[in-house]
């Protein structure tokens, strides 16, 4: 038996406008899916969060393009159609396995919503139910405090993407109207209201029913301040000034709050799209889930296969649609080759690293193997917060001036090369972040490194030791080079050696001055 597909409307933004049925279905679902732009933030998920439960699978569906350009051969529509088809098949994998899937939708699922694209592709294949929600038009009318239509009037709903002349022609004959899809279309929409001769009675409502709502006469709105979640309303003339109903009604609430900042997508260059048959090398950050970037989370959500060192894969939320391929930490080349082979066979593969994949991690290994044996497989590298950044942020700003990152591991380079580089970095008065400082197989090397540093550096040099930063056993120690005990350090630590300009404040924070005397 297959699972059941639900398109669930969440209303315009007020959490109390989520229906009882929507809340019940969200909490009961095996899989909860939601759309987001490339910044990874989902309004729908935020509204649904109070009703989610532990153990549910979340499917993040990230648009490949929103307002920016694309080099997809089919243009914008081609990129979007390909995305909807791939997203539908991701959900179909769950439905085929008998899992119920809820697709979240702001407002109403069938009112300019993304859910309808899943519905068109899946509803004929699986049992489906659509749960209506309060639309943004209804929410905006309530905020405005004026009826949209009454008696025999006709409400016209229009997309702001229409040409100005066509939009104006509709507005000239409309009893009442709502114009959706503003944002970048706003100047043309306002021009259409002016051409139609109705600008003086039109209203603008932004993020209706939320704590960020804004209501203004349409003529007074700064075009630079208009987000996508806004609309223009032409209320019923029957309740306008001079009519009994209007005289009795309260005037609309006009917000004096400053406009929100521009949308996060403005000016963002679209990265190379991830298609079928590709490898994406992903950095999870140093430990805590919130240190994984939205771009990395999107790549993980899109993948068919997840490849990586076992403990790192354990940090990725379980999704039964995906296959995990854990391996030992010392088989980077083999791991890379396996990922590339799966991609060549048509799979979307995410290779997982801790921290940043380009810093002593899997990115170089994948690219090296790809260059030699898999030149036809596209590889993309997504950055992550690396351990040096994480430790530095926890103690202050020790990387405030020039610094270097050095691995003490001699697995891939001779130990005498490590010591030579360490001495030169110390002599150059760089802050030094030491990765892989001390393992069970080479417990003596950090002791030798400390002695090499003391040949050049003062024993009072500030040292920071961060262990499991971002994890459950996080600890931070601020000491000096003379007092550093290498025996307390293990592979879960990062050791940061300050420069002559590194200082400790009276409150215990560490910083490196940006200037020399």
Image (spheres, rainbow, N blue to C red):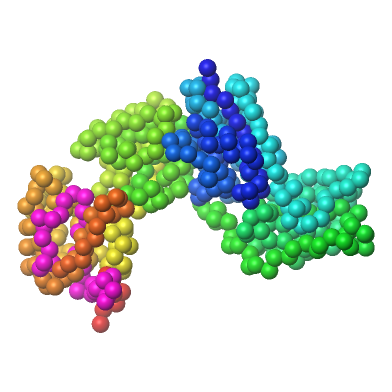
Q: Is residue 445 visible?
A: yes
For this rendering, which residue is in front, 184 or 208?
A: 208
Task: Check the image and report above or below for 485 versus 297.
Answer: below
- The residue drawn where x is 16% and y is 71% is 461
Query: Is most of the magenta stretch helix, strand or loop?
Result: loop
Bounds of the magenta segment: 481-509
Q: Is residue 435 left or right of residue 174?
A: left
Q: Position of residue 386 (x, y in %)?
A: 31, 53
Residue 370 among magenta residues: no
For this rendering, which residue is in front, 373 or 397?
A: 397
**Which quadrant of the structure image shows residue 199?**
bottom right
Task: Check the image and report above or below for 483 versus 202.
Answer: below
Q: Position of residue 343 (x, y in %)?
A: 38, 30
- The residue drawn where x is 46% and y is 35% is 56
Q: Is residue 216 left or right of residue 4?
A: right
Image quarter (top left, top right, bottom left or bottom right) of the C terminus: bottom left
């Amino acid at each position: 038996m297959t699972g059941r597909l639900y398109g669930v409307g969440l209303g315009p933004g007020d959490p109390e406008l989520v229906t009882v049925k929507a809340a019940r279905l969200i909490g009961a679902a095996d899989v909860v899916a939601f759309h987001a732009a490339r910044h990874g933030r989902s309004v729908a998920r935020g509204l649904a969060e109070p009703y989610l439960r532990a153990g549910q699978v979340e499917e993040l569906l990230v648009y490949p393009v929103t307002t920016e350009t694309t080099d997809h051969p089919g243009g914008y529509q081609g990129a979007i159609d390909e995305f909807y088809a791939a997203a539908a098949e991701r959900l179909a994998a769950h439905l085929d396995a008998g899992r119920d899937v809820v697709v979240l939708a702001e407002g109403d699922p069938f009112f300019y919503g993304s859910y309808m694209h899943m519905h068109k592709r899946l509803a004929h294949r699986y049992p489906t139910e659509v749960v209506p929600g309060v639309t943004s038009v209804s929410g905006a009318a309530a905020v405005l405090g004026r009826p949209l239509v009454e008696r025999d009037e006709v409400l016209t709903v229009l997309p702001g993407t229409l040409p100005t002349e066509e939009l104006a022609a509709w507005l000239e004959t409309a009893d009442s109207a709502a114009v959706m899809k503003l944002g970048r279309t706003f100047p043309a929409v306002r021009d259409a209201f002016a051409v139609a001769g109705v600008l003086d009675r039109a209203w603008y409502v932004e993020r209706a029913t939320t704590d960020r709502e804004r209501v203004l006469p349409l003529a007074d709105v700064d075009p630079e301040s208009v987000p996508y979640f806004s609309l223009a309303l032409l209320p019923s003339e029957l309740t306008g000034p001079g009519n009994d109903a209007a005289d009795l009604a309260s005037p609309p609430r006009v917000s004096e709050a400053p406009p929100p900042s521009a949308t996060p997508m403005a000016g963002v260059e679209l990265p190379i799209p991830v298609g079928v048959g590709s490898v994406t090398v992903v950095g999870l950050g140093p430990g805590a889930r919130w240190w994984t970037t939205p771009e990395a989370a999107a790549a993980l959500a899109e993948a068919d296969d997840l490849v990586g060192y076992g403990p790192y894969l354990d940090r990725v939320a379980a999704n039964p649609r995906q296959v995990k391929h854990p391996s030992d930490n010392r088989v980077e080349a083999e791991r890379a080759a396996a990922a590339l082979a799966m991609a060549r066979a048509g799979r979307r593969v995410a290779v997982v690293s801790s921290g940043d994949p380009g810093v002593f991690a899997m990115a170089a290994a994948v690219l090296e193997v790809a260059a030699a044996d898999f030149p036809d497989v596209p590889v993309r590298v997504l950055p992550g917060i690396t351990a040096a950044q994480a430790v530095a942020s926890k103690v202050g700003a020790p990387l405030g001036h020039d610094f270097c990152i050095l691995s003490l591991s001699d697995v891939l380079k001779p130990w005498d090369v490590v010591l030579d580089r360490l001495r030169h970095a110390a002599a150059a008065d760089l802050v030094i972040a030491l990765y892989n400082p001390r393992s069970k197989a080479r417990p003596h090397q950090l002791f030798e490194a400390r002695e090499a540093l003391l040949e050049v550096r003062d024993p009072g040099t500030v040292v920071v030791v961060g262990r499991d930063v971002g994890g459950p056993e996080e600890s931070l120690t601020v000491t000096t080079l003379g007092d550093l005990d290498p025996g307390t350090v293990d592979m879960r630590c990062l050791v940061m050696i300050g420069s002559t300009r590194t200082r400790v404040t009276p409150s215990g924070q560490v910083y490196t001055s940006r200037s020399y005397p």
